[in-house]
Image: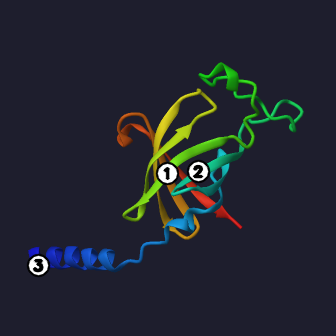
Amino acid sequence: MKRTISAAILLLLTITSFAQKLPADQILGTWQCSDYKIEVYKAGSTYSAKLLWSKGMFEADGKTSKKDIKNPNEKLRSRPVEGLTHITELVYKDGEYVDGKLYSVQDGNTYSLKGKLNGVNDLETRGYKGVPMLGKTYKWKRLQ
């Protein structure tokens, strides 16, 4: 029994070590989850994303973008939510995206962000304050 478990673990480690990591720029493009749609772009040596859509983003007319009223910087509270930079400073390191910042228009807070591509069209991100265990995970699908 111990041999079978050891062999299975060894096989899994071997498969994992030979699995190809996707190129860093594979994250570029438009992504959507149930609550948000973002466009990820390269900003120098890091990655950023602008907010294209979110639930409750528009006024009652369905066309006018709500304002960033919860922003801690009073001068930015009149800017539209649609198109604002939502994610910044995401760095590709060892097959994952780390050290990012996520600005939340819902509460005006900035959170830490990390993520990884689980496939060409599958992105998983986790926003958190302090430790990742206390955060929230979003699963994104690439839009063509």
Q: Amino acid at mark 3?
A: Arg
Residue drawn at point x = 51 percent, y = 57 percent: 45
Q: Position of residue 41 (x, y in %)?
A: 63, 57
- Report how far apart the C-alphas of labels 1 and 3 lie in the structure: 42 Å
Disc 3 crowd rating (10 Å Cα; few below 14, some 14-19, many 20+) is few
Look at mark 2 in the image and give the residue it sits on.
48
User: Is 29 above or below relative to 70?
Assistant: below
Residue drawn at point x = 17 percent, y = 73 percent: 5
Residue drawn at point x = 20 percent, y = 77 percent: 10
Asked which secondary structure carries label 3, the reply is: helix
Label 2 or label 3, whichever lies nearer to me, is 2
- Report how far apart the C-alphas of labels 2 and 1 lie in the structure: 6 Å
Q: Position of residue 74 (x, y in %)?
A: 66, 19
Look at mark 1 in the image and give the residue it sits on.
90
Precedes in sequence: disc 2 or disc 1: 2
Q: Quadrant of residue 62?
A: top right
Q: Amino acid at mark 1?
A: Leu
**Left or right, residue 5 beside residue 101:** left
Q: Position of residue 52 (x, y in %)?
A: 72, 47
Label 1 or label 3, whichever lies nearer to me, is 1
User: Is 8 above or below relative to 70?
Assistant: below
Q: In the image as oriented, which residue stretches furthest toward the right? A: 61
User: Is 89 above or below relative to 128?
Assistant: below
Q: Amino acid at mark 2?
A: Ser
Look at mark 3 in the image and give the residue it sits on.
3
Precedes in sequence: disc 2 or disc 3: 3
Asked which secondary structure carries label 1, the reply is: strand
User: Is 74 above or below relative to 5?
Assistant: above
Name the quarter where the N terminus is drawn: bottom left
